[in-house]
Image (cartoon, rainbow, N blue to C red):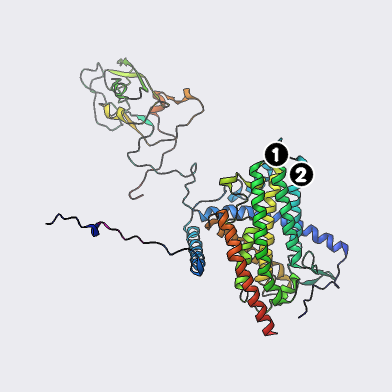
């Protein structure tokens, strides 16, 4: 007998506002106006919430996916070259590019915006730590959707997505970022969002 | 009870009158850009944002930049418009606004370098009626502007202003009669002097409220900005106007606001009366006007625009009976007290 439908449980009591008109209505309108005035005055003392964009910037989250960066080995990484890489065996990798031109990022890219042309490292002119290096590494920023798949695909952590988001330009050809541009640090550091912001 | 009109025995030389007119022009033309900037800055703060802050330090040159832009605009008339009337309409609006400002008193008659000078434009013996006359004439500027544009939106906007002005002028003058009865004079200077003991905002509080609300409507300020109603009418009677012709309408609107704030200050807030020597009178008057202008801006930031039928029923069914009641009660009290 528990499942018997009890209509009163579904009933919602509707609260209606007072009927319009009469002296009460005038008082309600007047008091509502005063309340409104108090509300706007409160906003006045709250101060502006505007972020003055070119001077101030919205801080981004640590995992924000902005402009790509190509990485080099740090000076104190402590990694040495492997045995199969020619005459410079055992030398430090400090300053060498991490990218070995494997083109896995190209394969992973859904927007088809990366172009890599690989070339062999020579003992006299060593660019990367592997056998080959990326002679051409271009990202077309007009096509990139900043999904971060290239970052995931890279076996050497050579490419990551940074925090820079000011990528506008006057010419589309200027938005094809070359290897030199991607290796360079961004001119201006984007502020990072702190805990609780 | 006899109604004493303003004293006509006191006359000033023509030279003093010319200087006074120049001062009135200079005052209004400097104050309007300042009020404009103040309104935009303050509206911004009321909405949690900065107002204009790019042109000059703290955006102080923004009105200058606006005027510069308007002056550089092409003088344009639509095919259906009447160019002569379209040129005349903004001039009427500006003229009436400045003319009405002439009776705002900034001080009593004082002695400046041996000449007796009244710190007001004119003290006419019809007093406050003069302001109403020019307030009503200003409506010809709007109406002519709307009609001469040859655009239905402008015309609708002009019609709305006409209906609004007529509805609210009645309550406005009725609210005023209470003050006139208490002061026993039509002259603004005499009305201010009569407030020496107590400002009329205290005994005439209802009249003050009615006058102020009607003042919002008279100056086409929110929440009664139906003639403009940007969302529905694209801008009302001034839609087809560009360049400084539009600028003149815009300036006239702000001048009207300053005139109304001057009237409110003089009629209800004790005008130029305040502590300190007589020399400080203009300062007190400007301060009180400033306070009223601040309130105008505050209300603009708060209240949404009324619907057209709400505007009409509020004017005729609420304000007018209230004003009449206020008038009756004041009349009875004044008769019993005398």
Give residue B259's quadrant in the image. bottom right
Badge count: 2
A13 in magenta:
yes
Residue B291 visible (yes or no): no
Residue B85 numbered mark, or none:
2
Q: Are marks 1 and 2 in contact (CB under 8 Å)?
A: no
Q: Position of residue A76 (x, y in %)?
A: 28, 33
Q: Give x and y (percent) for residue B264.
A: 66, 66
What whole-number distance in Å separates the C-alpha atoms at marks 1 and 2?
22 Å
Q: Is A195 left or right of B2, judged from the image as shown?
A: left
Residue placed most toward the observer, B253 or B40: B253
Q: Which residues are magenta?
A: A10-15
Residue B281 drawn at (x, y percent): 71, 70
Single out the mark in the foreground, 1 or 2.
Answer: 2
State the SS at label 1.
loop
Mark closer to the chain start, 1 or 2: 1
Instruction: Give residue B72's mark.
Output: 1
Q: Give the position of the N terminus of chain A as an image quadrant.
A: bottom left
Q: Mark 2: which secondary structure?
A: helix
| Residue A54 visible in the snapshot | yes
Q: Quadrant of residue B77?
A: top right
Side of A59 where B69 appears, left or right: right
Occupied quadrant, residue A157: top left
Bin the neighbour count of mark 1 within 10 Å (Cα to Cα): few under 14, some 14-19, many 20 and up: few
Q: Main secondary structure of the magenta part?
A: loop
């Amino acid at each position: 007998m528990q499942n018997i439908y009890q209509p009163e449980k579904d009933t919602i009591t509707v609260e209606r506002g007072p009927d319009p008109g009469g002296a009460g209505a005038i008082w309600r309108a007047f008091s509502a106006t005063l309340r409104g005035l108090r509300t706007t005055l409160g906003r006045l003392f709250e101060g502006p919430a505007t972020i003055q964009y070119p001077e101030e910037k919205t801080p981004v989250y640590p995992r924000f996916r902005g402009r790509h960066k190509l990485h080099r080995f740090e000076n104190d990484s402590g990694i040495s070259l492997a045995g199969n890489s020619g005459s410079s065996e055992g030398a430090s990798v400090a300053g060498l590019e991490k990218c070995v031109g494997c083109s896995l990022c190209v394969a992973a890219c859904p927007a088809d915006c990366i172009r890599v042309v690989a070339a062999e490292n020579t003992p006299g002119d060593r660019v990367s730590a592997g056998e080959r290096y990326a002679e051409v590494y271009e990202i077309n920023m007009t096509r990139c959707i900043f999904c971060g798949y290239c970052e995931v695909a890279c076996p050497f952590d050579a490419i990551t997505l940074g925090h820079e988001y000011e990528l506008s330009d006057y010419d589309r050809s200027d938005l094809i970022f070359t290897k030199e541009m991607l290796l360079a640090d961004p001119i201006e550091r984007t502020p990072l969002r702190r805990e609780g912001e | 009870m006899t109604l004493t009109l303003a004293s006509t025995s006191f006359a000033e030389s023509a030279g003093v009158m010319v200087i006074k007119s120049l001062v009135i022009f200079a005052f209004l033309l400097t104050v309007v850009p300042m009020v404009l900037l103040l309104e935009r800055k303050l509206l911004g703060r009321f909405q949690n944002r900065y107002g204009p802050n790019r042109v000059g330090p703290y955006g102080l040159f923004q009105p200058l930049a606006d005027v510069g832009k308007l002056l550089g605009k092409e003088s344009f008339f639509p095919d259906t418009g009447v160019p002569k009337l379209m040129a005349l309409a903004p001039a009427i609006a500006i003229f009436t606004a400045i003319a009405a400002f002439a009776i705002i008193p900034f001080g009593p008659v004082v002695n400046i370098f041996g000449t007796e000078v009244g710190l007001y434009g004119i003290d006419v013996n019809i007093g406050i009626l003069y302001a109403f006359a020019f307030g009503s004439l200003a409506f010809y500027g709007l109406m002519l502007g709307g009609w001469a544009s040859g655009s239905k939106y402008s015309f609708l906007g002009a019609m709305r202003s006409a209906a609004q002005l007529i509805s609210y002028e009645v309550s406005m003058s009725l609210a005023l009669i209470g003050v006139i009865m208490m002061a026993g004079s039509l002259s603004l200077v005499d009305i201010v002097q009569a407030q020496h003991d107590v400002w009329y905002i205290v005994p005439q509080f209802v009249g003050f409220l009615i006058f102020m609300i009607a003042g919002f409507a008279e100056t086409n300020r929110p929440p009664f900005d139906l003639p403009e109603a940007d969302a529905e009418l694209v801008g009302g009677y001034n839609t087809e106007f560009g360049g400084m012709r539009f600028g003149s309408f815009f300036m006239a609107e702000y001048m009207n606001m300053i005139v109304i704030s001057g009237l409110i200050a003089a009629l209800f807030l004790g005008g130029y009366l305040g502590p300190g020597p007589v020399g400080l009178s203009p300062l007190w008057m400007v301060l009180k006007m400033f306070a009223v202008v601040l309130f105008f801006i505050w209300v603009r930031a708060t209240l949404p625009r009324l619907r057209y039928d709400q505007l009409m029923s509020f004017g005729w069914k609420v304000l007018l009976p209230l004003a009449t009641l206020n008038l009756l009660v004041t009349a009875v009290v004044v008769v019993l007290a005398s």
